[in-house]
Image (cartoon, helix red, strand yellow):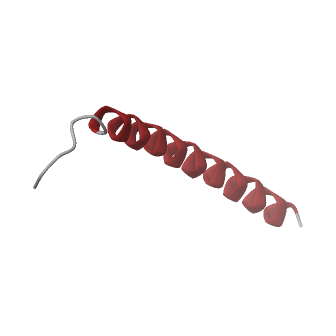
Amino acid sequence: MWINRHRLPEEILEYEVDRERQKFFCMAAEMIAEEEMKRTMRE
């Protein structure tokens, strides 16, 4: 596989940012799910 050396650092950075973003979305989704559970338990 041929790698374009000039683009590699940017791609790694993008990958890291993407992982952080996914982690954040997972946390947000869990928080929302917990809120929903609390709401349904109250009713």
**x then y, percent, for residue 13:** 39, 34
The answer to whether 39 appears left or right of 37 in the picture is right
* Whole-percent x, y for residue 40 in the image: 81, 66
Q: Nearer the viewer, residue 11 or 34?
A: 11
Q: Residue at x 64, y 55 (%)?
A: 29
Residue 30 or residue 1, whichever sits in front:
1
Question: Horizontally, is 5 left or right of 10 in the view?
Answer: left
- The image quadrant where one finds the C terminus is bottom right
Q: Quadrant of residue 36?
A: bottom right
Q: Position of residue 8 (x, y in %)?
A: 27, 38
Q: Residue at x 43, y 44 (%)?
A: 19
Give left or right: position of 29 versus 39: left
Residue closer to the observer: 6 or 38: 6
Q: Quadrant of residue 4?
A: top left
- Quadrant containing the N terminus in the rendered view: bottom left
Q: Looking at the picture, how far across and down is residue 12, in whole percent? A: 33, 37
